[in-house]
Amino acid sequence: MTQIIAPRVRTLVLLILAVAGALLAGAAPASAHAALTGSDPAQGAVVDTAPTRVSLTFSEPVAVGDDSVRVLDPKGERVDKGDPANPSGTTYSVPLVSGLPDGTYTVAYQVVSADSHPVAGAFTFSIGAPSETTVSVSAQASDDGLVGWLYGFGRYVSYAGFAVLAGGAAFVLACWAPGARVRAVQRLVVSGWLALTAATLGLLMLRGSYTTSGRVGDVFDLELLGDVLQTKTGAALVSRLLLLAAAALFIAVLFGAYARTADAAPDHPGDGDGGEPDKRDLTFGLALGGTVVAAGLAASWAMSEHASQGLQAGVAMPVDVVHLLAVAAWLGGLTALLVALHRAPVETPVGHDAVRRFSRLAFGSVVTLAVTGVYQSWRQLGSWSAFTDTRYGQLLLVKIALVAVMVAVAFLSRRWTRRLADARGSAAAEEAERAEEEKQPAGTAPATASETSETSEAGKTEAGHDAVRAAQLARQRAATEAARQKRLRDADPNRFGLRRSVLAEAGVAVVLLAVTTVLTQTEPGRTEQDARAAAATSSSAPATGQGSGAVSLTMPFDTGGTNGEGVVSVDLDPAQAGDNALHVYVEGPDGTPVDVPEVKIALTLAAQDIGPLPVTPDRITTGHWSASGVQIPMAGDWKVEVTVRTSDIDQVTVSKNAQIG
């Protein structure tokens, strides 16, 4: 429920559009959710002789295990040997047995990207000529089964628990101090803590199976759990558990010592008699400690997921922390307000001042979400087309639409807030007039029917009624009192209208949180588009032959600047030890030759610690560079790195491996 003024909204929308346009116009490459960008042999390639190894190149560093890369012959038998090696950069290779016969071979891989998500896939290549194969190329990822579903559900619960825990506590401290002694609000915040703690423990147990086999039985494998604890994600989950212990202490003080001091303040620690030094110190300490703990909890996500990898990680992680805190303040505070409106006793009503304070808090959260969200969108998408062409972009559009709906509903809440304030003012004035007319001293009011009933029942109990009857009467009185309070709450049409509008906001928030959780598990649009481009290039480029007398490598690039995208091709002839002729072709996205200020080549044979050997080709014509007499000292699996510079400050290095000799 947000207090939003129309001019502010117009200004905010214009600001967002301006910033988004500027950012997306100058998008630079980023990585997250690793994608396969190249392989040797290439996908679908037909090579003349059997390769000695298979190499895979990803868009970012990945974690590999013993069975991360498997090569299967046409009958489904494994022909790889040894563990995957990382000779350089983002390329990973596995050696093959010697003497492989002709036919079609399947390469299946399952790795964990640097942002903690498992990535799986498969492709084929052929030796001599394609053949029939009994291997299915559609590898099922470990996150596709029951374990994957449970892991995703645990992530949703953890996000929801964090929002309720942090946002509910912020609502009490910043907006409604008397809420600290309201049982319904206490149960809400404690439930958030319990949900986050249970989900974190569950994710820690599921993590090993989630990133490897996907089998339910492996959830309780202590060896896998030990491996998880050595990873970045495992460290983040353990850190979250330690911070939750500090959060438990914070909750105990908030609903203990702070709740007792809240009795002195009618609505907020700064009102009335609530300004005593001790109380101010306690409030300041809780606010500072709570902010530190909440920021630490948010950082446990930022340090292990999308924000920790790719472009500007040093900026992206703090931005992600601020984004999560803003989400918690808005959605968690909204949940606490809804519970207070529905469950707070009549003696401790949610006043207009409390609603107004939360309105300001929510408005600040929305502005923060808009600014940080634009940055995150640019970082994960990189182009306007990714909004509609990728699943990540489509989900992001749904999220933006849900936020817009919540802001629209907030206008209705603001109207009910004004009416509630006017009604409270009128009621207070009438009460003052009535007290002035009656001049009735305090304590002389006639006994109510409830009080008479309580006195009568007490007398009967004292007279010797049995304990069972007394307990029944106590339950009846409690039910009667609860019904009376509900009637009083529902009798106020303004309060009832505010409850309905806030409930609508909360309903949208539940869906919004679900979409956000799915977004964190979805391959970013920028990476998805890069993978598509690599696959298209691989399928359209000529196959890399071994022993065919030439090697042709094609690699997409993006320097991040204006006109920084394109494709670079390297031809090496005869691709043998000794003298070779090298040709480099640079084309734009539309396939036309383009000139760039500089192109450099480096050749490295990591297995023999040779290189990098620099090659500086000469410009021949538009988009064509050449070098003759390129000396390759020996045969092997050489890494060919191409550095393309498109301006004084924009350049990028792309690479592929080629079998020479």
Image (cartoon, rainbow, N blue to C red):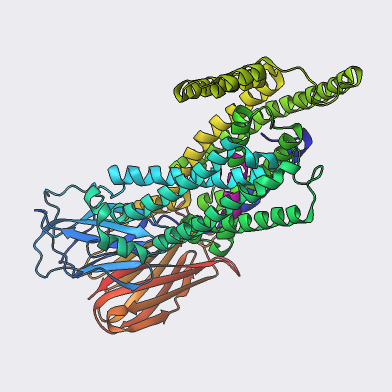
Q: Is residue 620 above or below residue 315?
A: below
Q: Residue at x 53, y 55 (%)?
A: 297
Q: Magenta segment, which residues?
A: 321-331
Residue 25 spot, x, y in % from top left? 61, 52
- The residue that appears at 36% across and 50% down in the rendered structure is 202
Question: Looking at this view, is 78 or 261 the one in front?
Answer: 261
**Would you say residue 342 is visible in this rendering?**
yes
Q: Quadrant of residue 70?
A: bottom left
Relative horizontal placement of residue 564, taking residue 127 as reference (left or right)? right
Q: Main secondary structure of the magenta part?
A: helix
Instruction: Classify residue 304 as left or right of residue 399.
Output: left
Screen quadrant of the C terminus: bottom left
- Which x, y percent locates residue 317? 55, 59
Q: Quadrant of residue 288?
A: bottom right
Residue 282 vs residue 324, the one in the foreground: 282
For the point 26% across and 54% down, which residue is it? 220
